[in-house]
Amino acid sequence: MAIKFLAVTFFFALVIILPVNVHYRNYRFPPANAPSISTYSPNPNVSPLRSGFVQRSEEAIAMVKEDSTTYPSSLLWMYVVFTYLFSALAMYLLVTTTQKIIRIRQEYLGSQTTVTDRTIRLSGIPSDLREEQKITETLENLEIGKVESVILCRDWKELDDMMAQRLVFLRKLEEAWTVHLGHSRIRSTQASRERAQSRAAVRQDAPLLHDEEDDHEQNHVAPYGEDRPKTRIWYGFLGLQSRRVDAIDYFEERLRRLDEQIRTTRKKDFKPMPLAFVTLDSVAACQMAVQATMDPTPMQLLANPAPSPSDVIWQNTYLTRSSRITRAWSVTLIILILSVFWTALLVPIAGLVSLKSICSVWPQLAFALDSNPISQSLVATGLPTALISLLTVLVPFLYYWLSTQQGMLSQGEVEMSLITKNFFFTFFNLFVLFTIF
């Protein structure tokens, strides 16, 4: 769109507007008789650049006054007409491009057939509708399509904590087996090498006596010369007593007991939360459900496109709305405090660029830098660049951690929040702050 607009405006400007200006105003690129700034005699009270600029401006005004007598006023309508023409062209291109984007978007959405594209995220569910059957009836009463499945989120924190603990024990068990098998393989390789050397020495003395034995000997079998790995467990009053036990047996037993607890916990009825993932029978039904108003009460039964299952942060699905709002406002307050901190930190860094700023704060350092051009170059260019580069690399990690604490429901929302925070930091602190100071 921008290329089309610039091409049309350039064509009319080159074919119509420029010839008219050249013919009636004797326009040049630049005027042949325009003197340069260096030819002006400088005023002792005014800088040469400002003196030349003022004199050149006065000459330009005089040239306009001289040409205004010969310029036909009947051609002034040309500028008004082309202003309206270019404005109408811009609005026409905006409308046509928007319609094209909408058409392409609808074609793309209509071509999607995955389960994710047919699933909506229904939030703000009232307490009397927090059942799969009631949610199904509510959506089907809209007559936009059939509901295939409903996943009502519940307070799975107890089960999630058990699964996280199980993952820790599983990793430790894998580590213990890795250490044990690694020692065994090293011992087996050393034993095999020693037997091979001994067979080579014996074969030199009696090569025919040991050929049959070599064929039947199992070289891959080796005794375990290393003990099984150990781990320390703490028990007794306040866990002050400890002893070392076999790591593999200990972690296997902990995994077995934890698996039994998980199977028992899964049979419980968990508290339903005001969030559900509903899969409809078509993409069109999903889009209509997103655009429909299901409940006149604010912040109830809000439908949005659902992220993919791998993108959902399931630990945040059982957070209450008040908890999520509190987290969001807390992070926003922390961002404002950090913005003030970045300003206080970057203002001195921005002052290092100018020797005059250093002189106003630390005159001795400014005089020392002025007498040493290399040190001045390092302080004025190298040091601010290094500090800004370090902040640009480290700050996104801090903002990413803050974004994960806001209680967002998908990883995509977390990354979008990170991009917004990082853009605010980069724009305000690197462009605005360095421009002002």
Image (cartoon, grey):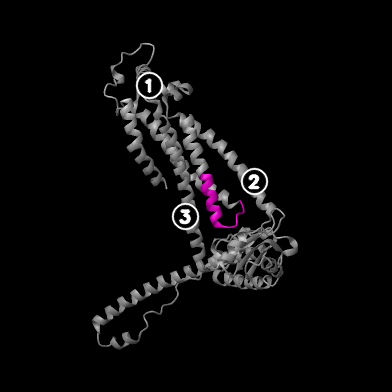
Residue 400 in the image: x percent, y percent?
53, 50
Where 235 falls versus 402 (above or below)? below
Query: Which residue lies at the image location 62% right of the left edge and 54% below the top edge?
Result: 407
Query: Which residue lies at the image location 37% right of the left edge and 21% below the top edge?
Result: 68
User: Magenta stretch: residue 365 in it?
Assistant: no
Q: Amino acid at mark 1?
A: Ser
Q: Amino acid at mark 2?
A: Trp
In terms of secondary structure, where does tag 2 sit?
helix
* Res 372 → quadrant: top left
Where 115 falls versus 213 (above or below)? above
Residue 255 in the image: x percent, y percent?
60, 71
Q: Amino acid at mark 3?
A: Lys
Q: Which residues are magenta?
A: 406-422
Mark nearer the N terminus (2 vs 1): 1
Per the image, the residue denoted by label 1 is 68
Mark nearer the N terminus (3 vs 1): 1
In terms of secondary structure, where does tag 3 sit?
helix
Per the image, the residue denoted by label 3 is 100
